Amino acid sequence: MKTTQITPNSLQLTRFGLCNCYLVRESSPEGDSFTLIDTTIGGSTDAILAAALTAGAPIRRILLTHAHGDHVGSLDALMKKLGPDTQLAASARSLPLLERKPNKSLRPGEPQAKIKGSLPGTKSIPTHLLAEGELFGSLRVIETPGHIPGHLSFLDERDGTLFTGDALVCVGRLAVSGYAPWFFPLPNVATWHKPTAVASARKLLTYDIARFAAGHGAIRSGGIPALQQALQQTGA
């Protein structure tokens, strides 16, 4: 698993050159610890734990952007190794999609489009349900549905790093989910409702963003101008 330092506060962990999860450092009087954002695909547990050990702090919290298999694939194995004191946080809307037998039923008011992508379900039950605007450690919770219902992004307000999950994609260029380049079609195939994804990306224009750390692709700088360009490329 490739490890890339983003800022003094965060590391990108990449599996097979394509799937990312992130370690975000938090400091307290008891010492430093990490929040892990997503868990990437199955079989990544030992590599994630080794990366945290090398970086010098334990993982105490796991945040989930959404329920797709390439983001929760190693969740159960990690929770088993990290122990019962580990916090696990997700959106309330993601709960039925995280069940062992995921419930894909849409709610009133949601676009009635088919939920797509791999939903393997998990045994792990979130200990904390995240809400729009909440501050979880140094991370601001932002609801960004569109790729899938219940999707969340997280903004590190210390340095402007936006952990986008699949709300945005950084393969080749910064792109809105559903509008990724032709050579990386997976987010397009797995996106639930493209107009909602565009609306979520427009919402991000109101935040102080310095760089984008997505579920797929390299770290992208450029801040709001880069996001504006990605929105223009949707034609929406």
Image: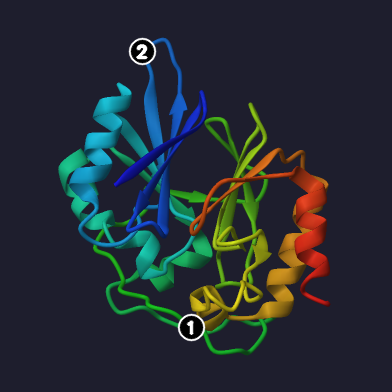
Q: Position of residue 56 (x, y in %)?
A: 30, 21
The answer to whether residue 204 is left or right of residue 28 is: right
Looking at the image, residue 90 lies above or below residue 81: below
**Is any part of residue 111 visible from this angle?**
yes
Residue 75 badge = none
* Front residue of this view, candidates 127 and 146: 146
Seen as rendered, the residue at the extreme top is 29
Look at the image and name its color scheme. rainbow
Residue located 47% across and 66% down the image? 94
Looking at the image, residue 166 lies above or below residue 209: below
The quadrant the C terminus occupies is bottom right
The answer to whether residue 87 is left or right of residue 105 is: left
Residue located 80% across and 47% down the image? 224
Q: Nearer the viewer, mark 2 or mark 1?
A: 1
Residue located 62% across and 72% down the image? 180
Residue 116 badge = 1
Q: Secondary structure at mark 1?
A: loop
Mark 2: few/some/many CA within 10 Å (<14, 14-19, 20+): few
Q: Position of residue 6 (x, y in %)?
A: 52, 34
Residue under label 2: 30
Q: Position of residue 18 (x, y in %)?
A: 41, 60
Q: Amino acid at mark 1?
A: Lys
Q: CA distance from mark 2 to mark 1?
A: 42 Å
The answer to whether residue 64 is left or right of residue 7 is: left
